[in-house]
Image (tube, grey):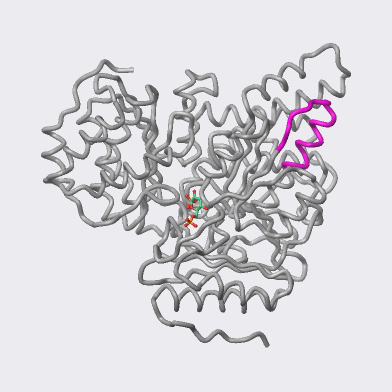
Amino acid sequence: MQDFKNINYEIIENLRTTDFKKRVEGIQYGTAGFRTKAEDLVHVAFAMGILSVLRSKLKKAAVGIMITASHNPECDNGLKLVDPSGEMLETAWEKIATDLVNADDNNFVPTLRKVIKDQGINEAAPATIILGRDTRKSSPKLAEAAIKGIDACHATLKDFGIVNTPQLHYLVVAVNTNGEYGDSSLSGYYQKLSTAFKNIRGTRINNGQYSAELQLDAANGVGALAVKAFQEYLKGFLTVNVCNDGSGELNYMCGADYVKIQQVPPLNVVSKPNVRCVSIDGDADRIVYFYTDENNKFHLLDGDRIATLVAEYLKGLLQESQLSLNIGLVQTAYANGGSTDYIKNNLKVPVACVSTGVKHLHHKALEFDIGIYFEANGHGTIIFKDSAMKVIRDAAKDKNTTESQRKAAAKMTDVIDVINQTVGDALSDMLLVETILHAKGWNLSDWEESYNDLPNRQLKVKVQDRNAIETADAERLCVKPKGLQEQIDDLVKQYSRGRSFVRPSGTEDIVRVYAECENAADVEKLAAEVAVAVYNLANGIGPKPVVPSKM
Ligand code: G16
């Protein structure tokens, strides 16, 4: 790290009151950092550049800044900070970030000084920032503003230019572990994942119903660049045909978020029936699989499916290698009831439910030797405790066990290297799913047979103030506005295996409604009824809205 030079408060004050004046009030660090219209984020980027330096000084390690708005439309953008271990910014610092960004221009420096004092930050400590951005038109300007903040604090900057979110997380960890996690370069990232993938695959490229070719919808986002780069490394082992590769509009009728929520194929994916297709999202940290059958019926295999597939596979490898490590699975309220029943009754793996946002899932997953976490929207990964990785690596070399035990352990060591443990990574997850389908000789319909999803629907409701909705119990209970939960309960009661919950989005200015029940025709109605209740109560229309009764 660079030698220390003082934080230049004079320059900071000057810039905050000229180029980076506050544009909007009340912007919050949400599910995935700050996210809103790109033109309202310039002062936020400047403040985040500075705050990342303070965080780096405090943690005595490199901190990341990623500029992206992932699944949001092109006109939006966002910034999130990445902690030294590759995790999302610690929750307590989200408030610090929100307060700093919202400080009045002339109160910005005093707020900054207060953070330094309250957190006991040693201003003389060195700092390193790892910066990355997506391909949005607004991203270079935000990167420039962040760099002005970083420079004013005289920190070391490693600007990786255009990268996707999981690559940025990887780079932060690679830098902080001095290359132990992987070489701190993009080529290091591709090399690590693809080498492990090819090791497991060996010389048998196709197997049973599995063929080594798929269609990939890249949401016209930054992930397309990584897919293209990967193609070189995977040549001869996996053919990935890319569409929505950046030549069209970002996230418009494509990408994992669109495919999951609308439950339809994306634009431009033209494939024969039963062809394996995947959609990644705008910054390549989410993935869903899908196919269309010979009757033109659409089939979605989402994050719940990936989690169960991985859990079953790893459980099998643990049994073969006779290692007694515990596995746990973490979901959110969006997890389909069908998947949760399957995990409890068939897989018999402990399963936990936490609030939306990978930071919550990641923390919970850390409790297990092997923690598998996935949001239904396809955002997730698998994390191994250091002690568990040591047990597995030792077992792969243990001459006192049988060959099959050693082989299973050795396979697990490669699986560990295919996985980007730092955060959900669409392409790493894809390589893992491809590995498992190949091992089983499965096509997508074989995979789909493990359990049945309950029909489900998600709706977005625009209200005056989405913060009028407050939730508890991992978002499964609505505690505000008064009376809304009772209405949801009354509606849900009318449907067999009915379940519904509502929560304010942390990335869009809307309230999300989720509904599921046994009958596909009913689920649309249940979701619509709950949406009406949300609209009425959140907007103060009432006291009791007219809710259509079940036909
Ligand atoms: C982000 C978060 C995810 C979350 C999603 C939607 O994803 O990283 O954990 O599920 O937003 O969040 P919300 O429902 O609060 O809008 P991404 O891929 O958009 O960064």
Does residue 148 appear in the picture of this structure? no
Q: Which image quadrant for residue 149?
A: top left
Picture layout, residue 544 above or below residue 304? below
Q: Is residue 547 left or right of residue 42?
A: right
Is-magenta flag for residue 228?
Answer: no
Q: Which residues are magenta?
A: 310-327
Q: Residue 460: horizontal and vertical position, in percent?
A: 49, 69
Picture layout, residue 179 above or below residue 230? above
Q: Residue 94: horizontal and vertical position, in percent?
A: 37, 43
User: Main SS type for the magenta part?
Assistant: helix
Q: Is residue 477 left or right of residue 153?
A: right
Q: Is residue 84 left or right of residue 527?
A: left
Q: Residue at x 70, y 25 (%)?
A: 413
Q: Residue furthest top?
A: 399
Q: Residue at x 76, y 54 (%)?
A: 444
Q: Residue 29: horizontal and vertical position, in percent?
A: 37, 49
Is-magenta flag for residue 326?
Answer: yes
Nearest to the observer: residue 60 or residue 200: 60
Does residue 539 appear in the picture of this structure? yes
Q: Residue at x 64, y 45 (%)?
A: 330
